[in-house]
Image (cartoon, helix red, strand yellow):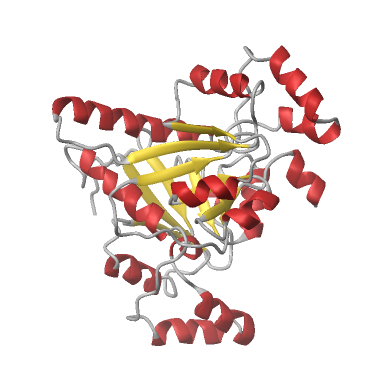
Amino acid sequence: MCVVPYELENRLVVGVASSAVFDLTESDEVFRRDGEEKYRQFQKKHLNDPLDKGIAFSFVRRLLSLNDLSDDPLNDPVVEVVLLSRNDPDTGLRVMKSISHHSLQITRAVFMQGKSPIDYIPALNIALFLSANADDVKAAIEKGHPAGQVLESAVVDDEHDDELRIAFDFDGVLADDESESVMQTQNLESFHDHEVRNQMQPHNPGPLKEFLIRVAKIQSSEEAKRRSDPTYTNRLRVSLVTARNAPSHERAINTLKSWGVMPNDAFFLGGVEKLKVLRVMKPHIFFDDQSGHLEKAATVVPSVHIPFGVTNRLSE
């Protein structure tokens, strides 16, 4: 079979475990209770029973819908989603059939029986890997890969509009944990002093910097489309939701500027509960590194834990 080479370098590539996109509660219970062979039999028996939508389903579906920005969505999409699975190819068939049933344009997959696929994240130019498996995500982060654990969360209504709303915390997610370390080891006043002294010094990147940059490229494509077609309405909206407030907000903004990106919205909350903003915003996915924030956020929006930096090391 002769296949034309397909490049991933100029696309936004997201890797997803089936546990991020579909509800695997029943399947996982069979595996834990009865073992691999019974699990295999269960999946074969239910091969043609589509899996229900999972926490990140709306995010993935809406992200893939942005491929209509391309002149050739089939052969030259702006977004590529790759399935990365611990299943073997046989038991993974049910997942692929579910993908087809739900009309998700996911055609590329990696199946690794009982093994984590995270070592293939760089090979596939993946800017974000999503999984419900905490161990896989933690191992990916420790290797310097961009990964997040999809938590049991509320699901945002998937039908009432065409927007894709993505919300990020800043420290430990987009930026590294340099400033968070000051906060954790000293106090809030020292944190603000540190940020003011270094306000013109951009932060080093955190795990999801590259994902944000690739998302921003798609936003630029939307802007170009809107200029050529005044009837077009932008669908991709990016928000920053952070516990920072003045005067430490300036370094965050300067850092984003230095990367050539800027969110549509920024909420510098300074201790105000993020839940209050997220309940109104209704993002389709929210990324944060702190479990304390996510426990409440997950009650209203699909939430993803980024197990990076000093806060997570201190909690181990």
> Does residue 254 appear anywhere in the picture?
yes
User: Quick check: 233 left or right of 263?
Assistant: left
Taking depth in this image into account, of 192 and 34 the one nearest to the observer is 192
Relative to residue 86, is residue 273 depicted above or below? Answer: above
Relative to residue 112, is residue 271 depicted above or below? Answer: above
Asked where in the image residue 230 lies, by quadrant, the reply is top left
Relative to residue 219, is residue 52 depicted above or below? Answer: below
> Does residue 123 appear anywhere in the picture?
no
Considering the image in quadrants, where does the N terminus appear?
Answer: bottom left
Relative to residue 316, is residue 269 depicted above or below? Answer: above
Q: How many marks?
A: 0
The residue at 19%/25% (across/down) is 227
The residue at 61%/36% (across/down) is 269
User: Quick check: 274 left or right of 3?
Assistant: right
Taking depth in this image into account, of 86 and 226 the one nearest to the observer is 226
Asked where in the image residue 29 lies, by quadrant, the reply is bottom right
Taking depth in this image into account, of 271 and 314 the one nearest to the observer is 271
The residue at 26%/63% (across/down) is 103
**Position in image of residue 240 (x %, y %):** 52, 35
The residue at 49%/19% (across/down) is 257
**Position in image of residue 108 (x %, y %):** 35, 55
**Position in image of residue 178 (x %, y %):** 72, 28
**Position in image of residue 11 (x %, y %):** 35, 37
